[in-house]
Structure formats: structure tokens, C-alpha cells
Image (cartoon, grey):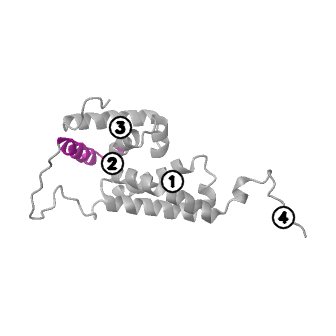
Amino acid sequence: MTSAAPPSASLPTEVLMDPEQEFTDLFAVLWPRLYRMAVAVAGDAGAAEDAVQTAFGKAYASWSRVRRADHVEAYVRRMVINEILGARRAGWFRRELPRETVETGRVSVAHDDAVADRDAVWAAVRALPARQRAVIVLRYYEDLSEEQIAAALGCSRGTVKSQASAALANLRRAGATTEGDE
């Protein structure tokens, strides 16, 4: 009776891993983080969920190509951002427009100034143009470098810098910055 020998060290890693399990593991790890990032970029939880779901669907459909990327997380993150920005470009005239407030008949008052400040900042961030919002979220929420943001958005570092500068100027004009924002 012979036992199966362990896999040879010379076999590529991708042959040893089950692609289905690999995608499932990646999905479980990345979904929460990419969803939070997408909500911040899109400004809407429903649109964010749609973008992340669509990006993961496309990643699954072309998993053999996606899994060979040098940085799979960055690859899928870019897919999510492209979905958000692409959805904003196509069909902008058919979308429902979110309202600032929803009338519920109840009046709620924030009791904590910090919560009110954070809400004001996020409202100002949501009011930014989509690319500026993406740069701000990726830089300050995801803590990515200019090079990583440029790769995620498919633009140059100079464009990232100019978009960040314009976004911060818009946030200052809206009174949504606090000390130490630079």
C-alpha cells in the first residue's frame, strides 16, 4: 500500500489551491472593508452594496485572471471604484436623487457635539464630486498612499494630488475640516 506523496514544492501555488475556496476566502475577508469604502465613496449604502456585489461578480467570472494579479485586493478595490464611478456616469438622468432629510414626523437632536461634527464632515464629503470623494475616502479612510490611489483610480499621482487639493478646499469652504486635517 502506497501513500500519496506530498505535493512537490516546484508546483505553482495556484495549482495547489482550490480556486473556488480561494475566491470564497477572499470574498469573506474583503467584503466588509470594500463595502465600508464603497459607502464612503458612493455616499449611499444601496449603491455601495450594488457596486461591491457587481465587482465581486465580475471578479468571480474572471477569477483565473484576477487571482494572478500582483495585488488582488487592489485589483478588486479598483473594480469597486470603477463600478461606483461608472454608475454615476451612465444613466445619471434616470437615477433617484437622495434627499438631505427624510421627513418622519419626529425631530431628533444630536446630544453629542462630536457626532454632529462627524455628521457634518460626512455630509460635506458626500457633497464632493465623485472623483474628489473617492480620493478623500481612499486617502483618509483607507489610508492609501498617493501611488496606491492613482493605481486604484487609473490616473497619475499628479491627478490624485490635484483632486485631493480641490476636495480639501471644498471641504474647508463648507466648514467641514477640523484641526490636523492636513
Which of the numbered marks, if any, corresponds to residue 4? 4
> Which of disc 4 and disc 2 is earlier in sequence?
4
Q: Residue at x 53, y 50 (%)?
A: 73
Which of the numbered marks, if any, corresponds to residue 57? none
Give the x, y percent position of residue 82. Answer: 44, 53
Quadrant containing the N terminus is bottom right
Which of the numbered marks, if any, corresponds to residue 76? 1
Q: Amino acid at mark 2?
A: Ala
Look at discs 2 and 1 and give the one toward the viewer. Answer: 1
Cα distance, mark 4 to mark 1?
37 Å
How would you classify the magenta stretch by its main secondary structure? helix
Q: Amino acid at mark 4?
A: Ala
Which of the numbered marks, if any, corresponds to residue 163? 3
Q: Are marks 2 and 1 in contact (CB under 8 Å)?
A: no
18 to 156, vertically: above or below: below
Q: Residue at x 32, y 33 (%)?
A: 165
> Which of disc 3 and disc 1 is earlier in sequence?
1
Q: Amino acid at mark 1?
A: Val
Q: Is residue 31 left or right of residue 105?
A: right
The residue that label 2 is drawn on is 130
Cα distance, mark 3 to mark 4?
57 Å
Q: Residue at x 27, y 44 (%)?
A: 125
Stretch of the chain drawn in magenta: 113-131
The foreground one among 7 and 165 is: 7
